Amino acid sequence: MVTALFCWRVITIPVVGAKTMVEYYSGGTIYQNTSAEFKESLWKNLVMAVNAHMLGSFDKSDLKFFVNRSVWELMDGCKTQALVREASMGGFGQRFSERSAWIVQGPPGPSAVVLLYLHGGGYAVSLSESQIMGMSVIHHALPDEVRKNVSILVLDYSTTVDNCVYPTQIHETLVVYQQLVRKGYKNIVLLGDSAGANLALSVTRFLAYRKEAEDHFGKFPIFRKSFEADLPQPYGLILVSPWVEPLKKPQAPPKGVDVRGDLLDPNSPMGKWYVEGVNVKDAKNWLSFVDTSFNEHWSRIDAFRKANRCLVLYGDREYLRDGIEKWLTIVSKGGGVQQKLEKGGIHDCVFFVEVIDFMGRRNSKQILRAASPVGIKNKFGFSNIVSFLADLTEEIQAIN
Ligand SMILES: *[C@@H]1O[C@H](CO)[C@@H](O)[C@H](O)[C@H]1NC(C)=O
Ligand SMILES: *[C@@H]1O[C@H](CO)[C@@H](O)[C@H](O)[C@H]1NC(C)=O
Ligand SMILES: *[C@@H]1O[C@H](CO)[C@@H](O)[C@H](O)[C@H]1NC(C)=O
């Protein structure tokens, strides 16, 4: 059932709303003061202030009750959104497997790219409408020459709310990955935000370090049947605010960095939920990445060795910033990682803040124009993701 703390936070939402409104029209909210995204939208400030207020109040039972929706329900809901309704999004909402659905589906082939999206939410919160709409924005914002070659698939992996813990999510991702490869989609780019980025890294390590992976994951009953030996590594990785150390409480960022209003609760129990009953010592280097070494754990990964195959985005006001930067110094040794720090950025800004401008019932022509290659120019997350993905797809087109 619903917990008392959760109820209390819900009841006090109007107080947070009122305070945010007063700040918005007087000195400025913390969001307005730090980031251009929030300057002219009271609505965005309200949404973020309320989200930040609600963080830390959930127990598993609250999440079960309020934020546990299947990908099918969500995609049905998104069909009324202008971006989906008014535009040709072939295959939107179609099932690929038991737990995955197409945002847009093109045919397989040597120059076809699949963006496989692994959502964030601490392995506890299910997919959200804003994340699905974020994928739709990426589709529309790709340049015409590459858009047709990029399919987008979302995976609705099991969560800890249903007591599905490590490494269930890794297994479910690999199952879909293998299915894609079997169907002829060989160029797979993993896109993950927060916990989804953690998952993308676990899966990539699995694929690049097969022998070590079999030794470790073979101990878990679900991995009894092994995966094909010659699965290719992901062609590219896009990691947004990656949660690189779920086993540790994040340190507050360096002095002078104001994390007020960040979309992450440093005291969240979600990391603990993920490894409940798991021998953490054994699993450590497969899920928590800050104490790893480049030579031992990353050097075989193509996305870190080859130029422009890995993009990492994060914000300068994130609780997770220190951890992300520590991990970046390790994987940067490969020379291939592009890292971009957003000024005034909070956790997972692209899928929870930037995306707001592309949702709702406003004039659909206006929304479609906004989600074009030109329209996203001033969106830090979307513009970086889209130009990275476009370059990568062009590179693949040129080879084939
Ligand atoms: C935002 O900046 C203004 C001007 O410096 C300041 O008065 C106000 O208190 C700030 N707002 C917050 C929430 O810190
Ligand atoms: C949460 O959603 C998933 C996916 O739809 C479903 O399988 C599961 O039973 C749901 N859990 C609860 C507690 O409702
Ligand atoms: C992908 O790109 C290639 C080369 O530009 C093109 O020939 C091919 O038709 C494209 N595939 C799809 C599915 O559009």
Image: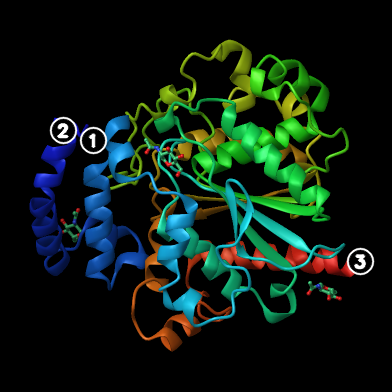
Label of residue 57 in the image:
1
Name the residue at 9% across, 54% down: 14
The residue singled out by tag 3 in the image is 400
Q: Which quadrant of the figure contains the C terminus?
A: bottom right
Report the Cα–Cα distance between label 1 and label 2: 6 Å
Crowding at dot 1, Cα within 10 Å, few <14 / some 14-19 / many 20+, comes out as: some
Type of the residue with mark 2: Leu
Type of the residue with mark 3: Asn
Q: Dots 1 and 2: beta carbons under 8 Å?
A: yes
Label of residue 21 in the image:
none
- Residue 19: percent from the left, percent from the top? 10, 56
Report if the beta carbon of the residue with label 3 is closer than 8 angstroms to ligand 3. yes
Q: Secondary structure at mark 1?
A: loop
Among numbered discs 2 and 3, the one appearing first in the sequence: 2
Q: Is residue 239 visible?
A: no
Name the residue at 71% across, 58% down: 114
